[in-house]
């Protein structure tokens, strides 16, 4: 194990502190964002909220083919590459094939899925895009996202035949609601609402998971961009990037 020199340690601590400050300021940040949000505060949104959703749905089968051609063994478990995901990624059967995240494009992955890469490049306010694989029997515990400044999108690509036992449960203002995935039918939601995920089947589930900036105006838009810049430079993102770089270099060696 290599020893981190002191200046590097300080930079890492600075990035960690910056991200921690963002977490600590979340209630204030969210209030500011929602004050100038162009969308209402709700858990689940209509599939027609963004124009790009229709474009992805029109091409879902081709996107599915690109995703499922990737050997599952080549897709790392999220818990292996992101220590900060902690308990929610403890089940190593949750795998993530990163295409882009916080301005870092995984060129080697995008090259393997050219149509998908071309389509996601057309999405305004794109923050992250990954193929998310939930292997048979996997469970993601109840959790919530970091900010209302982002919305989460799922394009189901491969759903177990027993779809009633493969679902996401989202808690909205009226209580808990179950949303089974259906192939080619989008789900757009605010992940700051508590949610939990199950795949109680014998088959794997594939979705294209995207996070986009919530449309805002005025000061909220500026603050959100600043916050996302801070997250990009935080230990949270830098750890993931470093782990993915290491995997790429190991595979190329």
Image (cartoon, rainbow, N blue to C red):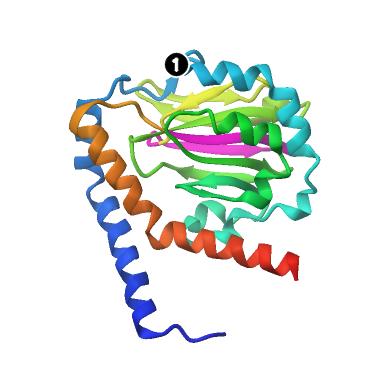
For the image, the number of numbered tags is: 1
Q: Residue at x 52, y 38 (%)?
A: 196
Q: Secondary structure at mark 1?
A: loop
Q: Is residue 89 left or right of residue 217?
A: right
Q: Is residue 222 left or right of residue 188?
A: left
Q: Where does the N terminus fall, quadrant-wise? A: bottom right
Asked whether residue 159 is in view, the answer is no
Relative vertical location of residue 204 with respect to residue 180 in this rendering, above or below: below
Q: Where does the C terminus fall, quadrant-wise? A: bottom right
Q: Is residue 159 left or right of residue 41?
A: right
Find out whether residue 125 is within the magenta segment: no
Magenta segment: 192-212
- Residue 202 in the image, given as x and y percentages of width and height: 79, 39
Residue 234 location, quadrant: bottom left
- Residue 55 in the image, given as x and y percentages of width and height: 60, 18
| Disc 1: CA contacts within 10 A as few (<14), some (14-19) or many (>=20) | few
- Residue indicated by mark 1: 49
Front-most of residues 234 and 86: 234
- Residue 111 in the image, given as x and y percentages of width and height: 70, 45
Find out whether residue 198 is within the magenta segment: yes
Front-most of residues 78 and 123: 123
Q: Residue at x 62, y 67 (%)?
A: 246
Front-most of residues 194 and 223: 223
Asked whether residue 181 is in view, the answer is yes
Q: Residue at x 29, y 39 (%)?
A: 224
Q: What secondary structure predominates along the stretch shown in magenta?
A: strand
- Residue 4 in the image, given as x and y percentages of width and height: 45, 83
């Amino acid at each position: 194990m290599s020893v981190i020199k002191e200046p590097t340690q300080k930079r890492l601590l600075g990035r960690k502190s910056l991200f921690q400050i963002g977490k600590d300021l979340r209630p204030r940040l969210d209030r500011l964002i929602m004050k100038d949000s162009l969308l209402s505060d709700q858990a689940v949104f209509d599939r027609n909220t963004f124009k790009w959703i229709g474009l992805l749905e029109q091409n879902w089968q081709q996107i599915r083919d690109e995703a499922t051609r990737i050997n599952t063994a080549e897709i790392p478990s999220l818990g292996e590459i992101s220590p900060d995901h902690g308990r929610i990624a403890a089940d190593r059967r949750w795998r993530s094939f990163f295409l882009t995240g916080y301005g870092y494009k995984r060129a080697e992955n995008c090259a393997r899925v050219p149509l998908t890469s071309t389509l996601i490049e057309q999405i305004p306010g794109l923050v992250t895009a990954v193929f998310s694989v939930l292997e048979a029997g996997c469970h993601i515990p109840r959790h919530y996202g970091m900010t209302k400044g982002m919305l989460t999108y799922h394009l189901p690509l491969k759903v177990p035949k027993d779809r009633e036992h493969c679902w996401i449960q989202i808690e909205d203002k009226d209580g808990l609601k179950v949303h089974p995935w259906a192939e080619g039918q989008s789900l757009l939601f605010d992940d700051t609402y508590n949610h939990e995920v199950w795949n109680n089947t014998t088959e794997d589930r594939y979705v294209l998971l995207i996070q986009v900036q919530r449309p805002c105006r005025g000061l909220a838009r500026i603050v959100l961009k600043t916050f996302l810049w801070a997250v990009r430079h935080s230990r949270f993102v830098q750890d993931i990037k470093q782990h993915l770089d290491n995997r790429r270099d190991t595979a190329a060696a």
